[in-house]
Image: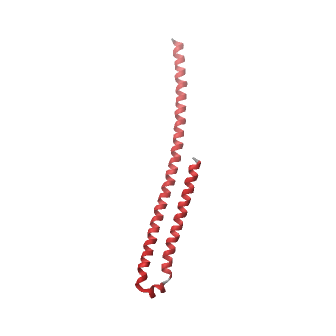
Amino acid sequence: MDRDSHSEDTLSTLVLENIKNKLINAFRGTAESRADPKDLETQGCSVRPLSVSRSYQANEELRRAQIDGAITWLRSELLEMRTQDLQLAQTLLGLNTEIQRLRRESFGGLEVEGKDQQ
């Protein structure tokens, strides 16, 4: 279980690092398009589609990053649920074993008393 937990943690870390890099790249692209207002004036309308394209691209990267973040959160929640499920299963098995032991002791005592009375 520790090995699975460690691999899930590593995977989550890699996914989060990827999201961070995507966000940095997405916002770097929009910052570059805003950084040169002189170029916009000199090049006229031909730059606007590029700016819109970068904005669309940044929005797509942000949307993907949000989806990746949601998937990472779901994975961590599922991993936590799996851990809780295993703990619950162990508890139930322990309780079942204890109930069976108590039944054997209880029925064993009754059978002995019943034989003594006959």
| Farthest bottom residue in view | 42
Q: In screen coordinates, is 96 left or right of 52?
A: right
Q: Nearer the viewer, residue 83 or 8?
A: 8
Residue in the image at 51% along x and 67% along y: 22
Residue at the extreme top: 118
Q: Is residue 25 above or below residue 43?
A: above
Residue 2 x, y percent position in the rendering: 59, 48
**What is the tally of numbered marks visible in this picture?**
0
Q: Is residue 2 left or right of residue 74?
A: right
Question: Residue at (44%, 66%) from the top-left corner?
Answer: 63
Relative height, residue 91 to residue 11 (above, below)? above
Q: Position of residue 30 (x, y in %)?
A: 48, 75
Residue 56, horizontal then vertical, whole percent: 42, 72
* Residue found 50% across the figure and 53% down from its top: 77
- Comparing 73 with 115, the one in front is 73
Q: How is the image coloured?
A: secondary structure
Q: Nearer the viewer, residue 76 or 99?
A: 76
Residue 60 point in image, percent of width and height = 44, 68
